[in-house]
Image: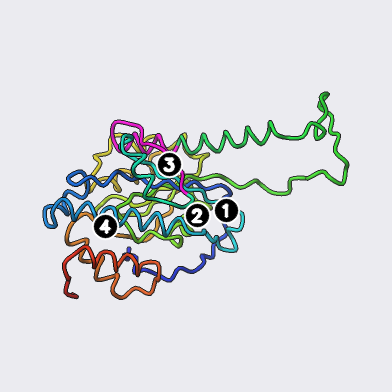
Amino acid sequence: MPRDAFPDDGPTSDTVTLGRIRLGMFAKYWTPGNVKTRLASDLGDDVAANVYRTFFEHLCHSLGSRFRPSDQQSSADLSRSIVFSPATMLDQAMQSITGPWDWTTQQGEDLGERVRHWFYEAADGFDSCDAADRTSLPKDVSGTDGSDQTHPADRTVPHSTPPSDAVLVIGSDCPTVSHHTIRKAIDHLGRNDLVIGPASDGGYYLLGIRTEALPRCDSLFANIPWSSDKVLSLTLRNANQNGLAIGMLELKDDVDTIEDLNRLRDQLRTTKRTELHGLRQRLDQLLPPHPPV
């Protein structure tokens, strides 16, 4: 599976049937010593924390820009949440970010519990919207006796299956995730129960699930040794055991080590993706010069 080579941010081609999509980005406050600890062994706690903050703010800006679905995704409606930790730093973090993001806090003892909780929280939000839509229907649409009182010309006759809902989650360790990535994930979810973006360290940088498949996905988050190179393989095993159809995105790098960071900087030197130019400039300001490979 080839690593993503920063493809042009162009439209995808497959037909999809998704309507409401909720994107959650997991993040934590950039306290030195609490983030990017492997990077800190080479760069120091303060610089490593600033690198993490740079990734987070870049993703908030790039993924917070207007989402333009492809022609086949014209019904897709993307909303965005930052799923944050710790709750005590939420107000301070919110002051540094603008854009179409709402905020919620992570709930659970380990990463698996926190991700599972977020999926159900986002899906429950869809259900709440449905209930609100139903209670706001005008009374003259349906009589109290259950009869239809609309004029025949005003009736809407369903002619196709309504779009499905889906929830996507990403982390803050892979700054090259883009709207192009999200569009491809949506395409996969039009044909599969879930979509996974595999990371080169044996984990994943994106996980998406169609909400109707959630009851069959609980095992995806159980008995997983998080922060190990077994996360992806065990997640795929659990998904296959539950008969889930899986779509796979291209391989990307989570940036956890100095080698990962240097590889990212080399890629940023040659990319034509304009939204990554600012990321390259900020990293060059933070870090010592890195000679090309």
Q: What element does badge 1 sit on?
A: loop
- Of label 2 and label 1, which has the lower sequence position? 1
Give the Cα distance between marks 2 and 1: 9 Å
- Of label 2 and label 3, which has the lower sequence position? 3
Quick one: label 4, few (<14), some, or many (20+) residues within 10 Å?
some
Q: What element does badge 3 sit on?
A: strand
Please give the label number shown on residue 185. none
Q: Are marks 4 and 1 in contact (CB under 8 Å)?
A: no
- Of label 3 and label 4, which has the lower sequence position? 3
Please give the label number shown on residue 186. 2
Q: Nearer the viewer, mark 2 or mark 3?
A: 3
Amino acid under label 4?
Ser
Q: Are marks 2 and 1 in contact (CB under 8 Å)?
A: yes
Please give the label number shown on residue 200. 4
Q: Which residue corresponds to mark 1?
A: 76
Q: Which residue corresponds to mark 3?
A: 103
Q: Nearer the viewer, mark 3 or mark 4?
A: 3
* Towards the viewer: 156 or 262: 262
* Towards the viewer: 213 or 268: 268
Query: Which residue is drawn at the image coordinates 34% and 44% (left, top)?
Result: 93
Q: Magenta residues?
A: 101-119
